[in-house]
Amino acid sequence: MTPDQGAENEVRLELNGITKIYPAVIANDDVNLKVRRGEIHAVLGENGAGKSTLMKMIYGVARPDAGEMKWEGEVVHVENPAHARSLGIGMVFQHFSLFETLTVVENVALALPGNIDLRDLSIRISEVSHKYGLPVDPQRLVHALSVGERQRVEIIRCLLQDPKLLIMDEPTSVLTPQAVRKLFDTLRQLAHEGCSILYISHKLDEIQELCHVATVLRNGKVTGDCIPSKETPESMASLMIGKELPVCQHEVPTELGEVRLRLNGLTVVSDDPFGTSLKNIDLEINSGEIFGIAGVSGNGQQELLYALSGEEPLTQNEPIVICGEAAGRKLPDARRALGMGFVPEERLGRGAVPQMSLAENVLLTAHGGGMLNKGMIQFEQMYEFTRRCIDKFDVKCGGEKAAAKSLSGGNLQKFIMGREILQMPKLLVVAQPTWGVDVGAAAFIRQELIDMRNEGTAILVISEELEELFEISDRIAVIAGGKLSPPKKLADTSIDEIGVWMSGMWPDSGKADAKSGERQADA
Amino acid sequence: MNLDIIESILFATIIAGTPLIIVALGQLIAEKSGVLNLGAEGMMAMGAVAGFAVTFHTGNPWLGVLAGMVAGALMSLLFAVVVLTLMGNQVATGLALSIFGGGLSAFVGKPYESEVLEAVPTLRIPLLADIPVIGPSLFNQQPLVYLAWALFGGIVWFLYKSRSGLLLRAVGESPSSAHSIGYPVIRIRYMATLFGGAMAGVGGSFLSVFYTPLWVEGMVAGRGWIAIALVVFATWRPFRVLVGAYLFGGVMVAQFFVQGSGLDINIPSQFLSSLPYLATIIVLVIISRDQNTVRLNAPVSLGQSYRPDA
Amino acid sequence: MLRLEPRAQPSQLMSYASPLLAIVLMLIGGLILFSALGKDPVEGFRIFFISPLSDIYGVGELFLKATPLMLIAIGLAVGFRANIWNIGAEGQYIMGGVAGSAVALYFYESEGPHILFLMIVAGSVGGMLWASIPAFLKTRFNTNEILVSLMLVYVAQLAVSWLVHGPMMDPDGFNFPQSRMFEESAILPILIKGTRLNAAFLFALSALVVGYIFMYRSFLGFQMQVAGNAKNAARYAGFSAKRMVWIGLLSGGGMAGIAGISEVAGPMGQITEHISSNYGFAAIIVAFVARLNPIGIFFASLLMALLYLGGEQAQQYMNLPSSISNVFQGMLLMFLLGSDVFINYRLTWKRG
């Protein structure tokens, strides 16, 4: 796997001593980087290592405080993204930069210079999408597209400008394993044609499979360069996190206990025009197991979580049974009283109030445990609980009065998990437990979940990270197009099988119409 | 009800609806960019007093309209600095602007309280004005009535046919996306806000220069708020603004209907005067009942501060 | 080039200092305004801000004017903390005054302490009823409470106008649009001799204390604060959004209604079309300047009352329209909203 012959040594992009300082943190510290023609160059690092900031500076969205950038041998100051595009730099964002209420072709037009005839542009979009195997309908509104399709729109938008460098920021976090392979084919084709690719990721196996060279970042600094195909995952991991990858202790499941959560034909018609309706979901989760639900985002996970937590209560009680009691119409606090804990995906603004102190955020859900007296707050008890949570879950913070938003993602997640766990729930529902969390905290959180399961709690984990689900789950199912697949014991399945299911194709699925990256794949 | 009465009701309806069209279309543009300026009432008041004063001193109503436009734009500039540059809360700042404009206009307008302007003659469009009933009421009108139509046409073209209009909608939908592909979000929002202010000023000056024509404290009488409600009611679509504004115009001249009906009923004038406000509430209830319609059409970032992290 | 840079932590200091900065800016703005009008700024300053307080009567007037502001502002603050934007306190104030006046006129020529008591109850109920319209429409149909409550201000003004031209008009009043003067038993007792300051001031003080306990000590107050800061967190915790809408609007309406009583059963002694001097809107400014804090409301109300008195003085001695008070009030609020940026940002100097 070598870059295009002949021009192998032509350096396209060179960064020297790039530094970017934000008020609370040095995002990039003296970063050096070289990308050659036709090279797929990985930038590897943990969440918060400074990868995205670095890319934003190359693309002109942010400006460096020090250092220089050379483009094809010349020093350039990228003023803005339009300037970057005129140089031949394109970027596909992790959180897409698309406009949902506009059509695909309008979205593409906004990124191109000059006044463009939309009909001509539609034809050009079709041509490019055909050439690179990126099927998409130019006339559709973006909000009707799956995440995979949205990513294709972003890629096409870049390709229409004949880029010499394409930046891909965590592109696979939204795709099924099969869609990832398709994407890799496209990227290899581009590289073969001479386009350089900067590939941002924290997934070691992908980088080994795809990339020619890798630059590793840790805490904003370059900790090393390497040829991924000549490294082991362990050696790259130690460059990335400075130590060995932590591993969870997962004992063999013991006998299952009573049913703690039962869904009986749960059907929810989404009232959000952009949402997914849930169709006839049946599910049983017992005490002493971790049940994982996999799926490509936007396939009903949000709706399922809102229905489970009670944030979007049902009109009937029967479809949701929590610890033996029908609870479909109950609000979250009533469900908590039945013994359910819930950790949502959004930590700031949902799981915690950003401006409020940790103690006040304890009061948010844990007020049932003697923190109230005739409607008045008992501050003693509130602070005591908070200190316990901070100690036991190793939350690094400025004390119980620190504002929730002053914590790092990992520490806030540990705090929220701790708050829910200390209430000793019989059933715990967790969404994306380690999303955006550093490796150390992620391992800690996974271990906590496993320990809780060993003590007999029923745990439901909904995650878009397949590897994580395979690491901690006892049973696993897939949600696609608002339908839930039958569960599988972990030992009886594989990442590949679940990946296929993620596009809605499980036996007897009756074609679940998944909003996955696979739809229209052969259009 | 004879034809003459229908004609005069229609005429009055068109006139009463015209300032609402102008102000609401201006707000529509600002809101499409994501800026919610609740200060329309205050900007209209300033436009009204500035328009009146300049017309009074120069004798030229068009200079008055221009002055109203500038006054409205200046007020919205103040708003824009606070919410766009200093990232103030849009709701609170809009309220403040309304209160401030009300007070400042009363203060500035005190010397003009007992003055009257000469009525501006209507502009007759040949041929069209000869059509029975609708001819005289639609095509023998105040010039600003026609300007409002032109404004409507221009805005429809701008929003749905021009690249700048596409960009404006994009900024209101997702400022962060617009920023990340390289558009100057704050500058675009400034321009949209200033346009909204200028139009509110024009609408205000229409009241004091063409409609009444005199200046009294509080003469805007909630029209700025009604215009804001109208944009919601129209689900951010220009054509519905046009229709809605004339409906409200009709409600505002309800006393003509009562007189024209020839019925001998004694309705308190206060009740008739309260109809536009009650109608606003009813209309808001009707449109808000279906949250999906509102959610699908409202600019996604409406009312939210945005600061690009450069 | 001057640039705004985000602070790593919001500045506690600035959150207290920014109202003071706004006051200073308002005073500077006032000096400029006086100069622009060709008045001696120092003299104008003296007449506006100093002379109203030169005797005990003046100080009494200050507290008298501050009373309805405190009452309304504390009621509004409860809702504002949960992002319930009741801006129709002006209308609720009027309807409270109307309801209380109806009681006073019904018991005309009778005596007893029950009359005042019933007036106050009627006043708060009247204000709450008027505020319950936006509350109902918001909880039932999702209708924007800002626009509805505001529209109802105009309706309330027209309603009171109709009443004093009709059913409530003084039969011996030569057709003036006003009610009879209330009897002694329908008038709030005066607190300090030689002033017009009445017992409503004590209500205002107790309302501030109760408001403080509610906001900072009770779980319900905490819930409303959560809803104001992060709507999704309130929903996640299971706090009822509808209940907060009702509490937010009814507290504002009820307190505004009582404020209406403080005026009709206080300095006015009757009901007329001009029952309000824009107290309902000025109280919004008070609530903001006070950062929705009861102690802040006490001082901000006094400041706002001083602006009212200053306006009257300016009219009398400087031949300026009294609406200059509104100009000062508006400036104060605009400056405050602007200075608040320094809580989360700081100015830095950057080349390039």
Image (tube, helix red, strand yellow):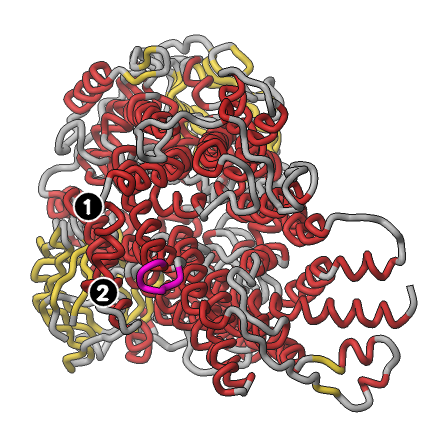
In this rendered view, identify the residue nearer to me: B164 or A164.
B164
Q: Is residue A132 visible?
A: yes
Judge depth for marks 2 and 1 and give the one in front: 2
Badge 1: chain ID: C
In the drawing, does residue A223 fall left or right of residue A332?
left
- The stretch drawn in magenta includes residue B88: no
Residue A216 in the image: state x and y as whole percent.
15, 54
Do the CB atoms of the residues marked 2 and 1 lie less than 8 Å apart? no
Badge 2: chain ID? C
- Closest to the observer, B266 or A154: B266
**Is B267 left, or right, of A84 in this rendering?**
right
| Magenta span includes C319 | yes
Q: What's the residue at 81%, 85% (across, down)?
A: B128
State which quadrant residue C41 falls in: bottom left
Disc 2 crowd rating (10 Å Cα; few below 14, some 14-19, many 20+) is some
What are the residue bounds of the magenta stretch? C316-321
Where does the C terminus of chain A fall, quadrant-wise? bottom right
Q: Is residue B290 visible?
A: no
Mark number displayed over residue C10: 1
Q: A255 above or below C81? A: above
At label 1, the amino acid type is: Pro
Please give the label number shown on residue C31.
Answer: 2
Q: Position of residue A29 (x, y in %)?
A: 9, 58
Give the residue type at disc 2. Answer: Leu
Q: In the picture shown, does residue A326 fall above or below A247?
A: above
Q: Quadrant of residue B3?
A: bottom right
